[in-house]
Amino acid sequence: MNIDVQSVTKNFGSFKALNDVSLKIQSGELLALLGPSGSGKTTLLRIIAGLEWPDSGAVRFDGQDALSLSVKERDVGFVFQHYALFRHMNVFDNIAFGLRVRPRRERKPESFIKNKVEQLLELVQIGSLADRYPSQLSGGQRQRVALARALAIEPRVLLLDEPFGALDAKVRKDLRRWLRNLHNELHVTSILVTHDQEEALEVSDRVVVMGNGKIEQVGSPSEVYDNPASAFVHDFIGESVALPIKVDGSLVRIGGRNIGLDTQGVAQGDARLFVRPHDIEIGQLGDNALEGEVLAVRRFGPTHRVDVSVPIDGGKATIEAAVPAGHEPKIGERVGLIPERYRVFAA
Amino acid sequence: MSIATEADVTDFVPETTATTVHVATGTPRPVRTEPAPVRWAIIGIALAFLSIFIVLPLVTVFQQAFARGWDVYAAAITDPDALHAIKLTLTAAVIAVVLNVVFGLVMAWAVAKFEFKGKSFLITLIDLPFSVSPVVAGLIFVLLFGAQGFFGSWFIDHDIKIIFALPGIVLATVFVTFPFVARELIPLMQEQGTAEEEAAISLGASGWSTFFRVTLPNVKWALLYGVLLCNARAMGEFGAVSVVSGHVRGETNTMPLHIEILYNEYQFSASFAVASLLAFLALVTLVLKTVLENRLSETRR
């Protein structure tokens, strides 16, 4: 099922949670809503689910108006941040819940429900835990139960709110591979909300980066990483070094000095330069180049991290460069810095 | 009585010695244990206090009730006025409990699951019956529904009796016992939040089915606990009921009022016989309360 979100706005008091957000979600894709807390991603998910209503705008499921439908009519499977398993029911009853609360004429016989729940228990690989209560399960197991419970009603869309947020790093990694494989198997349209970029980039087909109630960029994981559309996205995704610069005609100046970079079409005035640490090379001192003094050198996995102090307008900034082992400069040395790839955004 | 107190003390002695023996086999002098005389003094004071203020009165009630033998006891309890008082008390308590379960659930639901203006004022208001003297509570209803009261003439015109009748007694009892159910439910429901209800609704459950399958089971032990306290208070309530009942024998006398009348008429044995029923009820309540508290702490874990 494809979902069409059109100019949705939502305020909580004076706080703008969503500001004119439009988004198209293709049938069968796994989409990640990525952003810092307060960016509106969970609100958008809850509006799609029908747990929250927008102040204005429209949500369409396969072209049909979804806002006129209640939660139970929308056929959505929602996996809650802290799972929200029914604590007084065992795993089996939790998963069977959605099938058992159907209106009498739609309800399947108990034997069908039993079969279905057993299939789901197999699918999420927790067949042996059917009789356990939520309090007797680990975080990863609860997550699987929550997913099985949401899938039991054969939803048209699966919505996951920070599904791995409460798990430890190792389990999180395993579960996210597993979720990706599960999605390849089931092909149900899925939307995942996360503040963890690694999670979003690894699992999803497309990433929607959100900030301050707006969509900053929509694209494949590599597009979002390699071609950030805004300063916000560049800053939020991956490591970034940001420097205040001045665009002067066709020149880029830092602290009044031309550093020989392209303005990338940014207009005259204050701007910001973004570079990833591993895109900075340490080179010779030169006339039209960025230069500074090495403050510290740290070993960091296969590379060295070099802190270089660079004079900027009204002070100094510290730039972190990633240098392959064996090429690192000495502390106190003056070096030139060459950004191999960089982006200039208007301030 | 003195025998009972002695028996109580000897009951505790083996337990204390057992602990000392157990400790002695472990470390020779445990750090956190006070010297023996201090220990004995503390335990002694606690036991003495408990004996004088709790055990002694309780024993006295039963002792006085049976002072003139089983026949007098049975006669006092099977007296038609006493039977009527018991019936009235049970009726009022049952109605009060049912009403308070409904009100308590609605109130707790409103406070715990919704955000609205004046919420903290509402929570404060729930506690009002705790801070108002029961006599005042009774008077409020007399002023509202009595013959000279605010709605009095309307009720007289329609031949409805509220004051000096069952409705008045129920009203007073409901007022006095109102906080018990709501107070138990509110903190638990606030702690549990709304996620499970949202989950149920997203899985296609209707409002009713969410309430009966998710909300109610999650609070059932707290609800029973509230019902128990509410019931105990409803049966024992004296002040508020005394004001609205009018003390008509065999008609508007509840058990506590009946006990007072018997006592004022120097029928001590009969008065204590009925009192022993209330005391017995208190003991049953105590046992149930302990059981429920255990279940509650399990569900909260």
Image: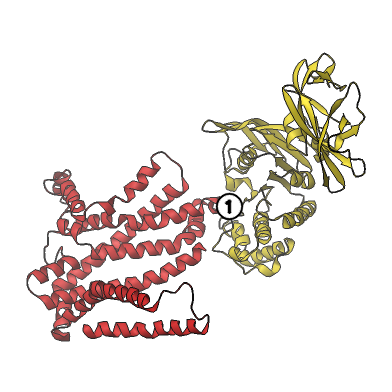
Chain colours: A yellow, B red
Which one is in front, B157 or B3? B3
* Residue highlighted by disc 1: B199
User: Which one is in front, A339 or B37?
Assistant: B37
The chain carrying label 1 is: B
Quarter-wise, where is residue B33 in the image? bottom left
Residue B248 picture location, percent across and down: 11, 63
Indicate the quadrant containing the C terminus of chain A: top left, top right, bottom left or bottom right: top right
Identify the residue shown where x is 41% and y is 38%: B117
Residue B264 image offset from top left, x and y in percent: 8, 69
- Residue A75 position, x and y percent, is 64, 48
Above or below: residue A301 compared with residue A251 = below
- In this rendering, position of residue A109 left or right of residue B179: right
- Say above or below: A235 vs B282: above
Quarter of the rendering containing residue B49: bottom left
Taking B10 as reference, is B163 left or right?
left
Q: Is residue B190 visible?
A: yes
Tag 1: Cα neighbours inside 10 Å, few (<14), some, or many (≥20)?
many
Where, quadrant-wise, is the N terminus of chain A in this rendering?
top right
What element does badge 1 sit on? helix
Amino acid marked by disc 1: Ala
The reply, left or right, for residue A12 in relation to residue A152 is left
Query: Which residue is most to the top?
Result: A249
Q: Going 75% across and 30% down the picture, which residue do you hit? A: A317
Q: Residue furthest front?
A: A332
